[in-house]
Amino acid sequence: MARAKALVVPPAVNVVMLGPPGAGKGTQAERLALRNGLPKISTGDILRRAVQAGTALGGSARQAIDSGNLVSDDAVICIVRERLRCEDARTGFVLDGFPRTVVQAMALDSLVSECGPLVVLDIVVPEDVLVRRLASRRICSECGTNASVDARTGCMKCGGALVTRTDDGAGVVRERLTVYQRQTKPLVDYYAGRPTFRSIDGHQAPDAVTAAIDAAIVEAGALQGGRL
Ligand code: AMP
């Protein structure tokens, strides 16, 4: 009798995008997720939608967001825990904007302990470039997608009006960069010793960053079966 063929189950692809505000995490996470049929999970998008919808979560997050500070670890860990339980995250995910503190990173490690390794990509961009990028950034008021810098009309995805984010004003941007240095940059040390950690030069054309990310993911050895 012929033996049944072993099933080849593709490994989960679990990606974390690290980097300061304006590094291009959102754009690159969106591309990576789309190309590979993975959900992009952005805690910033989820929180902004909650603020827009006037939910209890939105009410408690609004002040932190508008002042450039972080929302509580408990609240964002709870958001991510629930989101990772969804069916579409079973074969992997691209996390954008989470974790942002060591407490969140430790929580993530325990949430994904049975889902395969995390590929951690740290997108590096000089601070003066970040400040310039954030000053000209626009997002869609309807779906939250980042608009390209030269977009003059509506959102490419849904046609919604493009607006400046409430936290992209000069004063708040300075605070966000300070908060990044103090609370999120330590995550580089937290992850740097892992074989699946990679630094990406984010100060190049978006397509070049995308290519560097693809190469880094393959190189990180986290993928088998040529899914990415
Ligand atoms: P982002 O769109 O990722 O730049 O996030 C916008 C804002 O949402 C941040 O400045 C924080 O106020 C809040 N936020 C997003 N993600 C997190 C997180 N992982 N931890 C705490 N606050 C967050």
Image: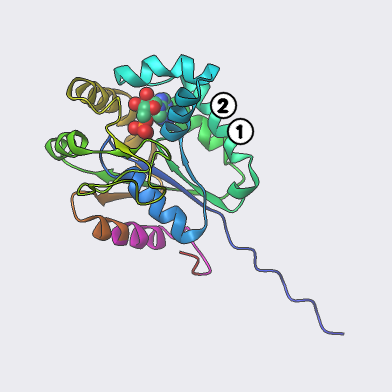
Q: Secondary structure at mark 2?
A: helix
Kindly tell me whether residue 69 is visible in this rendering: no
Q: CA distance from mark 1 to mark 2?
A: 6 Å
Q: Which residue is mark 1?
A: 82
Residue in the foreground of this view, choosing between 166 and 215:
166
Q: Of all residues shown, which one is farthest toward the bottom?
A: 1
Q: Is residue 218 magenta?
A: yes
Question: Residue 211: x and y, percent?
Answer: 30, 62
Mark 1 residue type: Glu
Kindly tell me whether residue 167 is visible in this rendering: yes
Question: Residue 67: x and y, percent?
Answer: 30, 17
Name the image colouring.
rainbow
Question: Residue 138: x and y, percent?
Answer: 27, 38
Residue in the foreground of this view, choosing between 91 and 24:
24
Q: Residue at the spot x=51%, y=22% of the render?
A: 75
Q: Residue at the spot x=33%, y=39% of the render?
A: 161
Mark 2 residue type: Cys
Side of 184 relative to 14 (left or right):
left
Q: Is residue 35 magenta?
A: no
126 is higher (above) or lower (below) than 73: below
73 is higher (above) or lower (below) than 190: above
220 is higher (above) or lower (below) than 158: below
Side of 111 relative to 192 (left or right):
right
Ligand 1, by image quadrant, is top left
Question: Residue 219: x and y, percent?
Answer: 38, 62
Give the quarter of the image for residue 43.
top left
Q: Which residue is mark 2?
A: 78
Residue in the foreground of this view, choosing between 76 and 190:
76
- Chain part drawn in magenta: 211-225
Residue 97, which numbered label? none
Q: Evaluate if marks 1 and 2 touch, with contact meaning CB atoms under 8 Å apart.
A: yes
